[in-house]
Amino acid sequence: MSGLHRFGIVAGEKSGDILGASLILALRDYFPRAEFFGVGGSEMIELGCNSLCSIERLSVMGFIEPLSRLPELLSLKKKLQTRFLKERITAFIGIDSPDFNLRLAKSLRKKGLKTVHFVSPSVWAYRQGRILGIKESIDLMLTLFPFEEDIYKKYEIQAECVGHPLADQLSVEDRGLKDRRDLSITESETVIALMPGSRIDEVNRLAPIFFETAVEALQRYPRLKFVIPFSNPETELLIKSFMERMHILIGEQFRVIDNSHKALGASDFVFTASGTATLEALFLRKPMVICYKLASLSYFIGSRMLKIPYVGLPNLLANDRIVPEYLQSAVTQDALLAELDKFMTGSNSFSNALVKFERIHKELQGGASEKAAYAIHNLVFES
């Protein structure tokens, strides 16, 4: 264990960067001299991961959108595969971005390298036939949610449910008051977090509707304040350009910040894109409305493959529609304003949701990164 170990690691977006950074820290307890290289964001790079390209190059969603980037993605896959094989890495760890990472893992596994995937693809939601391809691609699947582990074991794929690192990192205790003080927001003010996503295409589709809703909401509730977090310089520029176009001034009423946890901690109510931000809001016990919008053709394809009644993680984990969610053309200013009205007038207390948030949070706590690192250690040293 004290020898030099090299890990190939590829994360595809902001949430993957957070998971990757937490995992790198935990792996160093088992592999003190470990080196990490592949693709990572600012948090992974800060911990010494050598990123061979910007993480933004993998931040693409949908069924059709990746096709326009196919030559670039194929070139990156070949570059990483060549480097990982040359270095004879101890193991390859793909974090999310399954369409890219599982293809890379399959190529590496055929060459005798051990492969791990962290964050199960949504095989329970659509494209269930993918699980046979996953079986050929990986030696170990690390899942975030308990129900996912059973699916893989049914197909004799080695899987470990580790929970979610954010469930350990985020706590409701005193956080909101501190975050408000940091942003110079008083305890009595009502704050709405607008979270249109971490990817460019998400922001392009959701930010205009979120801002239209905010402008109209101020006509009804002029003392509202809004906090808008961004995940990277590209989304920051895009958010600010939308605000400029809509004559929304950045200042005391609209804050743009680079910390989603702080934005959520300071908020009373959240409009958010579907994804990891919904879990962050759940862990911090924030009433929310989930919005999901894809390119029209991607949604046309995906909606016909979908096997689940919800898209929002809180609803999936509760197996109940405890949080309002709006998809595609249903994401409108009128719909979002109606949900805000319910919150502001107290006609929807969200008390049922908040009770279930507590239960889900406890289920996902328990040292996720440490469990993941231990499972990878066992894979590396298994006979």
Image (spheres, rainbow, N blue to C red):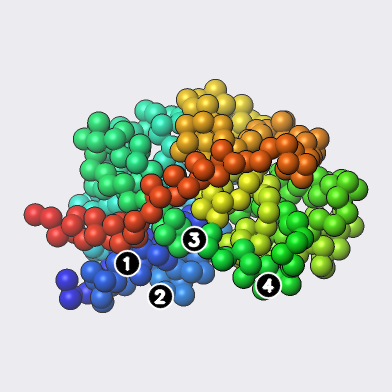
Q: CA distance from mark 2 to mark 4?
A: 33 Å
Q: Earlier in the sequence, mark 3 or mark 2?
A: 2
Question: What residue would you read off at disc 3?
Answer: 170
Q: Quadrant of the C terminus?
A: bottom left
Q: Amino acid at mark 2?
A: Gly
Q: Are marks 3 and 1 in contact (CB under 8 Å)?
A: no
Under circle 2, the secondary element is loop
Give the spatial CA distance, label 1 vs label 4. 32 Å
Q: Which residue is mark 1?
A: 26
Q: Quadrant of residue 38?
A: bottom left
Residue 254 at x, y = what percent? 79, 62
Going from the N terminus, do you reach mark 2 or mark 4 first? 2
Mark 2 = which residue? 48
> Are discs 2 and 4 less than 8 Å apart at CB?
no
Q: Is residue 128 above or below residue 317?
A: above
Dot placed on the residue nearer the N-terminal end, 3 or 1: 1
Estimate the x, y position of residue 373 in percent, counting from the top left: 28, 61
Q: For the residues marked 3 and 1, what is the alpha-carbon distance in whole angstroms?
A: 17 Å
Callout in the foreground (3, 1): 3
Under mark 3, the amino acid is Leu
User: Which residue, given by chain and number where applicable, does mark 4 sit on?
Assistant: 181
Between residue 63 and residue 150, name the one nearer to us: 150
Which sits in the foreground, 115 or 67?
Answer: 115
Amino acid type indicated by mark 4 = Arg
